[in-house]
Amino acid sequence: MARENLSFFDAPATQAWLAQFDPRDQPTAAEMLKAMALVSHEAFANGLSALLLRRLAKGRQPMGLYVERELPRYKGRPNRLFKETKTKVRKAYGIGPQPVKPTRAYDPDVGSEGLVAQLVSELCRQNKGILFNHPGPDSIRKYKIRRFVVVTDFVGSGKRARDYLEAAWRVASVKSWRSAGADKGLRFEVIAYAGTPEGQRNVEEHPCKPKVRFVAGCPTVGQLSSEDARYRIRGICVRYDPVDHDPTDSLGFRSGGALIAFAHGVPNNAPRILHKRAAKWAPLFPARVTANSRTHFTQRDDAQSIADRLVQMRQRGLATAAWLKTASPKLQALVLVLAALGRGPRNVEAVSRQTGLTQFEVERWLEHAIGQGWVNDKRRLTDLGQSELHMLRKTVVRQKPLQPPRKKMYFPTMLRAPS
C-alpha cells in the first residue's frame, strides 16, 4: 500500500483543497490526508494478484473468480446470478455472468470492476485449468469447481459484495453444492485489496459463510489511534460537509469514514469533503475521480514517512531516534509492526492499517518476531520485545570521527637512474 508522500501534499490540487479550510483547521485537514492510504495502479494490481495466487495455493483447486459489480434488482433483491430450469426440481444451467455490464442502459459508465476484470482475465489466462473466469453452472459441474471467489477493490459497507453473494445464493443448485460437506461442498470467499472491519463482518454474516481477505487494512476516521485526532477530523468532516452537515452521512456512505484513495477512484465510503462538490466547495477528488492526484500515488518508504507512522501510533521516542534515518527497510518494517503491537487491537488487519504494510508483510514479520521471542502467541510484546523497543529508543548513532583516516604511506615501486 502506498504511504503518504510529500509530492502528494505539494501537488497544486492538494494545496488548493487545503486552502479552503480556515487556517486553524488546516493542520487537522493535513493530518487527515497523512492518515490516508494512497494506492497506485502498480501496488493495486501486484497486491491483489499476489493475494489471489496465495489463496489459490492454500485451498482446493480449481477456483472460479467473479468480479463484484452492481447487479439488476427486482423488488429489492438482486436477480439470480445463474439461469434455472422451471421444473419442480430446479437446476442451474448455462454460462456465467458477464464481468462488466452496466445495470442501467442510460448510464454506460464502468467503475472499478473494469480494472479488476482485466486483472482477473490475465490471471485466468496464465493459470488455465485451475483458475476460471466467471464459470457458469455447466463449467462448475464439468471442471468440479468448488471455490466461488468474489474479487473486488474495496469492501466498505459490504453491501455490494453481499448482494453478489446473495444473487448466487438464490440459485437452488448453489445451495445444494454448498451443502455437500466440508470436503466436497462449494466454498465462498471475497478477496479485496482493502476494506473496513464493519464491511468484513457484514459480508461474513451472509448465510453462505464466506471468508473475507484483504491485501491491506484500510484506515478510517473512527479507527485512528488518537482519540483527539478522531474528534478533530470528524469535526471538520461535519462542519465543512458540502451537502448538509449531517453528523453521520458526512463521513461517507453508511458513515464509513474510509481514508483511502486508489489511482482508479475513491470509494463512496470516504468523507464527503473529499469528493462532493458545492457552490463554495471544490473537492480534492471530484466525483470520486483521482485524475488530478494519482501521479503522486507512489510508494514511499523513507525515514520521514516511517517516523510519521510512528507518531500516529504514539511512539514518538522511536520516531525521533537517530538510527531511523539510516535503518534498512526491513528493520523499519519490523519496528513498525512491534510498535503497533504495543497497543491493541493486535489482529493482522489492524496492524496493517496502522503501519501501512500489507497483511502478508505483517504476517511475515509477526512470524519472525515470534521466532525471536519478542512476541507471544497472543501477539503481545514479551519482556524481551519491550526491552528491544526500549533499546531502540535510546540507541545513538555513532558519529563519524573528526580526524580523517590516515592515508597509506607511499612507497615507490621503481627508481630512476641517478643523473
Image (spheres, rainbow, N blue to C red):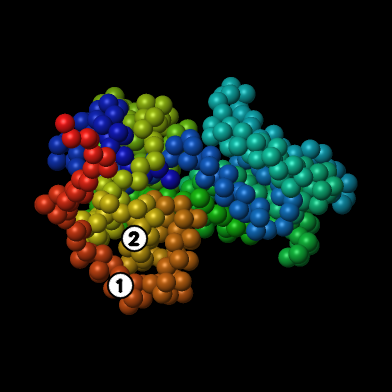
Name the residue beneath numbered marker 2: 335
The foreground one among 12 and 381 is: 381
Q: Quadrant of residue 310?
A: bottom left
Residue at x 56%, y 55% (from the top left corner): 212
Q: Position of residue 131 (x, y in %)?
A: 71, 45
Q: Position of residue 38 (x, y in %)?
A: 39, 40
Which disc, if any, is residue 22?
none
The foreground one among 13 and 157 is: 13
Q: Quadrant of residue 78?
A: top right
User: Few, some or many C-alpha atoms within 10 Å of disc 1 (few <14, some 14-19, many ≥20)?
Assistant: some
Residue at the extreme top: 106
SS class of the residue under badge 2?
helix
The foreground one among 131 and 240 is: 131
Q: Return the disc, 1 or 2, that comes first in the chain's sequence.
A: 2
Residue at x 39%, y 55% (from the top left corner): 330
327 w.r.t. 7: above or below: below
The foreground one among 247 and 354 is: 354
Residue at x 66%, y 55% (from the top left corner): 57
Which disc, if any, is residue 386?
1
